[in-house]
Amino acid sequence: MMTEICHGWPNNRLNFSHYMERSHVVIQWQNIDTILLDMDGTLLDLHYDDYFWQQYVPEQYATKHDLSVIEAKSLLEPKFKAHEGTLAWYCVDFWSQQLGLNIIQLKQDCRHLIAIHPGVEIFLNEIGGADKQLLMITNAHTKVVDLKFKNTGIDKYFDVIVSSHELGFPKEDPLFWEQLAQQEVFSPSRTLFIDDSLPILHTAKAFGIRHLLTIKQPSSQGLQRTNQGFPALDSFLDILPSRVQVS
Ligand SMILES: [Mg+2]
């Protein structure tokens, strides 16, 4: 499967054959009023977060506690695992306190790795001109959300931005969706939700969100995922409303 990003129809035979191998995701835009988009791994390159938690934090923890990086990783992994999918897991204050590290400062140290996935801004620009409600819904802590907005400017495309820390439940929890429906007006059957997390997509599906997509390669440095159980996007360019889509 190709890894390059295709900006429109390619102009040579090799690229054309690669193009035809791409996953074929069709959105019936006339059936969509509201678009909900995750941030990390969906709009932004997950490499930043992967590098931060899997490499940079263990290095800093090792230095602080006079350990090898391997020892630090083996101590940290079960701590991370124990809180996975909870609001605490996404909370920089929680981890600062747990690890004795200034997590938000360390996040800033790595900010050069914060990047928008190719094609995303073309898509967001186009959606901005369509008659659709566009919401970002993220589990990222508000301090991290601020850091990412400051470094990408991606917030300017959205009508509403919701952090699960404001609602009190992560997106993995059905109560997040109940709270969201109380706060925002949207019809689940006419809503498209795109997220790289499969547990979150399953919760959204159970709530009744009808149109669900995941991301084939959340990290530019990671593997392409297959058999996710949800249609997977190679690129947001594949679902541009202006593109003629053939089902
Ligand atoms: Mg994500």
Image: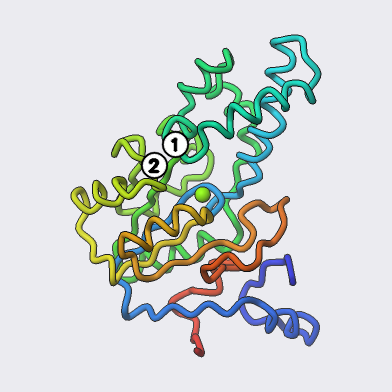
Q: Amino acid at mark 2?
A: Pro
Give residue 63's quadrant in the image: top right
Please provide percent x and percent y for residue 234.
61, 68
Of residue 7 and residue 50, the one placed in the foreground of this image is 50
Nearer to me, 196 or 148:
196
Name the element at disc 1.
Answer: loop
Q: Secondary structure at mark 2?
A: loop
| Residue at the (69%, 11%) spot, across then down | 64
Task: Give the answer, above or below, for where 235 lies relative to 20.
Answer: above
In this orientation, which residue lies closer to the viewer: 117 or 75?
75
Q: Are marks 2 and 1 in contact (CB under 8 Å)?
A: yes
Identify the residue shown where x is 44% and y is 63%: 125
- Please, which colouring scheme is shown? rainbow
Q: Nearer the viewer, residue 131 or 168?
A: 168
The furthest residue to the bottom: 246
Dividing the picture into quadrants, the one containing residue 82 is: top right
Identify whether 213 is placed above or below 176. Answer: below
Tag shown at residue 86: 1
In the displayed structure image, the side of residue 201 where residue 163 appears, left or right? left
Tell me the CA gap for discs 2 and 1: 6 Å
Which numbered disc, 2 or 1, marks the residue that appears first in the sequence? 1
Find residue 170 and name its label: 2
Amino acid type, mark 1: Thr
178 to 58, vertically: above or below: below
**Is residue 144 shown left or right of residue 182?**
right
The crowding category of the residue bearing disc 2, from other C-alpha atoms within 10 Å (few below 14, some 14 to 19, many at least 20), is many
Measuring 48% from the left and 49% from the top, which residue is drawn there? Answer: 39
Residue 98 coordinates in the image, percent (x, y): 53, 17
Q: Quadrant of the N terminus?
A: bottom right
Q: Quadrant of residue 193?
A: bottom left
Determine if the C-beta at disc 1 is less than 8 A from ligand 1. Answer: no
Percent of width and height locating residue 222: 71, 52
